Image (cartoon, rainbow, N blue to C red):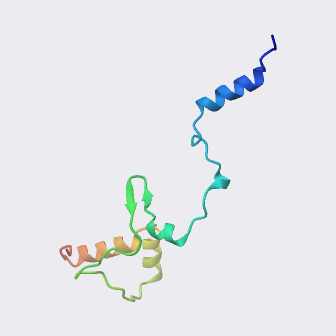
Amino acid sequence: MPRKNVKSSAASTVSKNVASDDWIDPDDAPEITDEMLDRAEIRHGDVVIRPGRPPLGERAKRLVSVRLDADVLEAYKALGRGWQTQLNADLRRVRKLKKAG
């Protein structure tokens, strides 16, 4: 009786147990097109990031130029990210203005 080839037997068993879409070679992935990017949904965790600036509404903040003493500007910039928002909040507090909105 001829001996069964162990190698081919094992290979056929493996090929029966592995689905063809368990492994996708990254080299076989399609090129990303502009159309795909237009339909793409960008996420940060569970939050969808919408492209562009959000609607500003009637009470939108306005861009102005203000001259500040160098030490005042340095102190606010030293706060890091959001220093402009803090400057706005401080001005509102000093002038005793209620928050817009």
Relative height, residue 8 to residue 26 (above, below): above
| Residue 17: quarter of image | top right
The residue at the point 20 percent across, 73 percent down is 99
Tell me the residue at 44%/78% (across/down): 73
**In the rendered view, does 6 fall on the left or right side of 34?**
right
Residue lying at the far top in this picture: please name it: 1
Task: Name the quadrant of the C terminus.
Answer: bottom left
Q: Is residue 26 left or right of residue 79?
A: right
Q: Residue at x 43, y 62 (%)?
A: 41
Q: Which x, y percent locates residue 7?
A: 77, 24
- Residue placed most toward the observer, 69 or 54: 54
Residue 90 vs residue 5, the one in the foreground: 5
The mark tally for this picture is: 0
Q: Nearer the viewer, residue 40 or 55?
A: 40
In depth, the one of 40 and 64 nearer the eye is 40
Relative to residue 59, is residue 48 drawn left or right?
A: right
In x, y percent, where is residue 94? 24, 76
The outermost residue toward the front is: 1
Residue 52, image x and y in percent?
40, 75
> For residue 91, what is the image quadrant?
bottom left
**Residue at left offset 61%, top offset 56%:** 29
The correct choice, above or below, for 28 with respect to 90 in the image is above
Position in image of residue 3 (x %, y %): 80, 14
Image quadrant holding the N terminus, namely top right
